[in-house]
């Protein structure tokens, strides 16, 4: 099933136990004793004020893993307190709040869009509600635009289209166009098709074909474009955490077809939910150094594969069966198609 994901919120009010045997999260050299959250902050940036590895900051909250499923929200004006003996983090009284206000953990009644995002939302917004990955099975079940009103070649918002294989009066449908195949660089297998989001349509008259009115269009929509039922918008809360099992994946694409990129850019991975990947996973980026040929004094040759170099981390924010999207959060050099991802 294809899931359309809408803007998500990440919160720091949950703890995941660190990897077995892992050293305690290390404090940043200039970590403050407290920090007051201001509008415009992201939680990843705030965590970088306290920890050398920002993604590990849920470990210092001392809450159990189940609380990931019911996280709390962090808002501007709240004060984050550091206890260096752990280290531990907690939430103090919000600026301007009454003295009797409860201490963390708790949920507040402020509008959800006032909570801090985990990562810069503008960097991933196009991938939350527009880009989607479909496989052969999805394409077989999708509806198809078979005609446009007044036989127009292309249509836009407010126009009427006709489609087959769609059902449900007043249901909203996502209109998309299958685009480039996503290919595993090692096996050559097609993992799915990255589809281009075109707009939304609402069915006005069921039938074969059904009649739909276009509610929006970011590109022209025409005969042959496909439709899938739109799911109810959902808001997700994530905490960053390492995968529980080993992960061996590769970067198979970079947004806009680039061959290399850097921090705060979106990359496509050749691993998804079938490999245990989930939203919120933090993965280490490793650079391939290639092979060298050593020649000894006797003229003999021996080939060595150089060890890979860890150079950054990426935050997974959207997951499909065999493909995932991640945002590069840290990098000390270019991020290149073909680089590998592993547990951090």
Image (tube, rainbow, N blue to C red):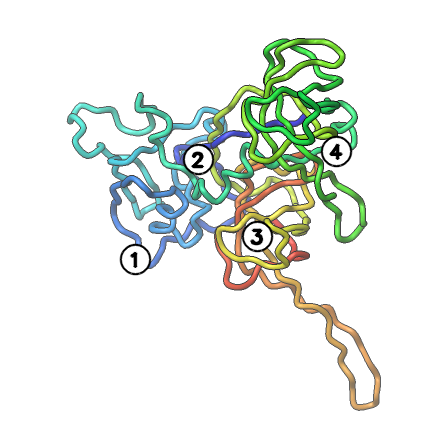
Q: Looking at the image, how many numbered discs can be counted on the residues?
A: 4
Where residue 98 sits in the image (x, y, percent)?
16, 25
Location of mark 1 (residue): 30
Location of mark 4 (residue): 135
CA–CA distance between discs 1 and 4?
48 Å
Location of mark 2 (residue): 10
Label 4: element kind: loop
Label 2: element kind: strand
User: Which comes sooner in the sequence, label 2 or label 4?
Assistant: 2
Q: Nearer the viewer, mark 4 or mark 3?
A: 4
Q: Identify the residue at horizontal 60%, vertical 14% (top origin).
A: 171
The picture quadrant where one finds residue 133 is top right
User: Which comes sooner in the sequence, label 2 or label 3?
Assistant: 2
- Note whether 170 is above or below 263 in the view shown: above
Relative placement, left or right, of 18 versus 110 is: right
Location of mark 3 (residue): 284
User: Which comes sooner in the sequence, label 2 or label 1?
Assistant: 2
Count neighbours of disc 3 (C-alpha within 10 A) and say few if under 14, some if 14 to 19, many if 20 or more: many
Count neighbours of disc 2 (C-alpha within 10 A) and say few if under 14, some if 14 to 19, many if 20 or more: many
Q: Nearer the viewer, mark 2 or mark 4?
A: 4
- Note whether 214 is above or below 188 in the view shown: above
Q: Nearer the viewer, residue 145 or 29?
A: 145
Asked whether residue 278 appears in the rendered view, the answer is no
Where residue 91 sits in the image (x, y, percent)?
29, 35
């Amino acid at each position: 099933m294809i899931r359309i994901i809408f803007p998500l919120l990440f919160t720091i009010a949950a703890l995941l136990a660190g990897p077995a045997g892992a050293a305690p999260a290390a404090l940043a050299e200039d970590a403050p004793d407290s920090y007051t959250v201001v509008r415009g902050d992201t939680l990843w940036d705030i965590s970088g004020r306290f920890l050398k590895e920002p993604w590990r900051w849920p470990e210092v909250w001392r809450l159990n893993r189940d609380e990931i499923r019911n996280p709390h929200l962090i808002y501007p004006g709240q004060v984050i307190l550091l206890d260096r003996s752990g280290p531990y983090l907690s939430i103090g009284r919000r600026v301007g709040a009454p003295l009797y206000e409860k201490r963390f953990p708790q949920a507040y009644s402020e509008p959800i869009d006032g909570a801090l995002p985990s990562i810069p939302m503008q960097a991933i917004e196009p991938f939350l509600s527009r880009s989607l990955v479909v496989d052969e099975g999805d394409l077989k079940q999708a509806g198809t635009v078979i005609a446009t009103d007044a036989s127009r070649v292309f249509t836009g918002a407010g126009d009427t289209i006709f489609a087959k294989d769609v059902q449900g009066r007043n249901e909203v449908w996502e209109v998309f166009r299958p685009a480039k195949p996503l290919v595993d660089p090692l096996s050559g297998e097609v993992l799915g098709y990255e589809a281009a989001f075109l707009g939304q349509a609402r069915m006005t008259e069921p039938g074969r074909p059904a009649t739909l009115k276009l509610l929006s269009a970011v590109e022209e929509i025409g005969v042959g474009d496909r439709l899938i039922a739109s799911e109810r918008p959902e808001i997700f809360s994530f905490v960053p955490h390492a995968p529980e099992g080993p992960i061996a994946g590769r970067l198979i694409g970079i947004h806009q077809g680039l061959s290399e990129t850097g921090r705060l850019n979106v990359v496509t991975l050749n691993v998804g939910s079938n490999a245990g990947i989930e939203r919120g996973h933090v993965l280490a980026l490793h650079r391939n150094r290639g092979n060298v040929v050593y020649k000894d004094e006797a003229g003999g040759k021996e080939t060595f594969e150089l060890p890979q170099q860890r150079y950054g981390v990426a935050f997974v924010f959207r997951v499909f069966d065999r493909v995932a999207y991640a945002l590069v959060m840290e990098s000390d050099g270019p991020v290149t198609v073909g680089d590998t991802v592993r547990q951090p």
